[in-house]
Image: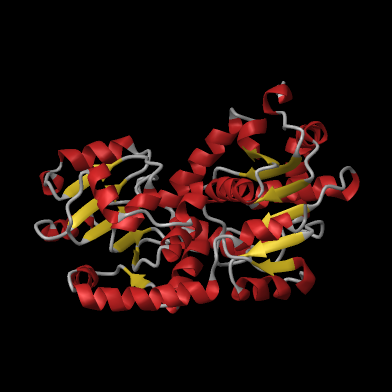
Amino acid sequence: MIDIKKVKFMSKKRVLLLSEGFGSGHTQAAHALSEGLKQLNPDLSTKVFELGSFLNPIVAPIIISAYRKTVSSQPKVVGMMYRSNYRKPTNGIAKLALHRLFYTQALRIVQQLKPDIIICTHPIPNMIISRLKKDRIKTPLITVITDYDAHGSWVNQEVNQYLVSTTNVKQRLLDKGVSENQISVTGIPIHPKFWKSVDRNHIRSRFHLQNLPTVLIMGGGWGLLHEDSALSYMTKWRETTQLIICVGSNDDMRKKLLDDPLFQHHNIHIIGFTSYINELMDVCDLLVTKPGGMTCTEGFNKALPMLFYEPIPGQEEENCDHFINMGFGEMLTSNDTVDRWFKLVHKEQALVEYRKKLIATRDGTYSPLDCPKAVLQFM
């Protein structure tokens, strides 16, 4: 039995944000939007749940673990699944299964928390709440699409408003039959701590970093940084380039790298999970990353050049194409790619001019406040 008393809202306008744990980006977006809303309106009360994990804490981790293993070992299968239902909304059988698994419990949560608005940052809770809206609740539902693509699984008739990353994603929803007045182009929400920059000297002192060209390498949380990638090759630059390698909560990967002589150098920093990625982005000159929607948007907001590696077929490929087309980087396909971009971060004036162009591109297309502002219009 769920103890709803532990998650009561305060007596303020209430926002319920629902996500799922299939990749960290969806939940990061929910928390980012939650914090952004409270920054703009401190009188709001927000709650964030990974709905499946909250309602079924035994089964959900098993499903998520199986998904991670599939992503790691059989990415082509993930791509086939993504494309098989790309154009159409999720079929009735899948929705019925979710309905039977979660309907009663999800309804109970909504009835007891009485949110003024519900926001979904993942297709699964989006389907569940849409089903509830058919006959049991009238709460407005906002769907935030957290990538630079619009899969059919996001589309439900009961959604009141879609908040999307780009005009291209808007067009893809229009092609799937969504009305234009239901779509707002707001960009993907990022945490308020990414809204402003921090002084580089302060960050270097905080993390014991040198004043050197610096590369931030992310994406090891799911074990997707392999020895056969360009990671080992990057260490050839360690005498003149600072490498910060963030492996998230992957302790096995962290220990493995720390034990490898290639990475035992004063200019190489191996870190686990950190809440200060925003500060590390402020001090780095190049970001090497998996092309997840959230990380790419954070790097975009910081006007960082980016190298993308091993995109998961489907939405990560779309994310990758979007930022490459905007001039923010390229796919990491060879050691030559590494050398070319590492040489750039050592050419101070060329890097300054390049980042000025990225800033102009960013400022012409994105403001991190647009997404929370759009939500507040519904309150």
- Residue at image position (73%, 36%) is 101
> Picture coordinates of residue 27 (x, y %)?
56, 46
How many numbered discs, if any?
0
Vertical comparison of 347 with 119: above or below: below
> Picture coordinates of residue 377 (x, y %)?
75, 59
> Picture coordinates of residue 308 (x, y %)?
36, 64
- Considering depth in this image, is 259 or 40 the residue closer to the camera? 40
- In this orientation, does residue 154 appear? no
Q: Is residue 57 left or right of residue 375?
A: left
- Residue at image position (70%, 50%) is 119
- In this orientation, does residue 243 appear? yes
Vertical comparison of 208 with 190: above or below: above
- Considering depth in this image, is 141 or 12 the residue closer to the camera? 12
Q: Is residue 122 left or right of residue 334?
A: right
- Considering depth in this image, is 190 or 2 the residue closer to the camera? 190
Vertical comparison of 29 with 275: above or below: below
Q: Residue furthest right?
A: 135
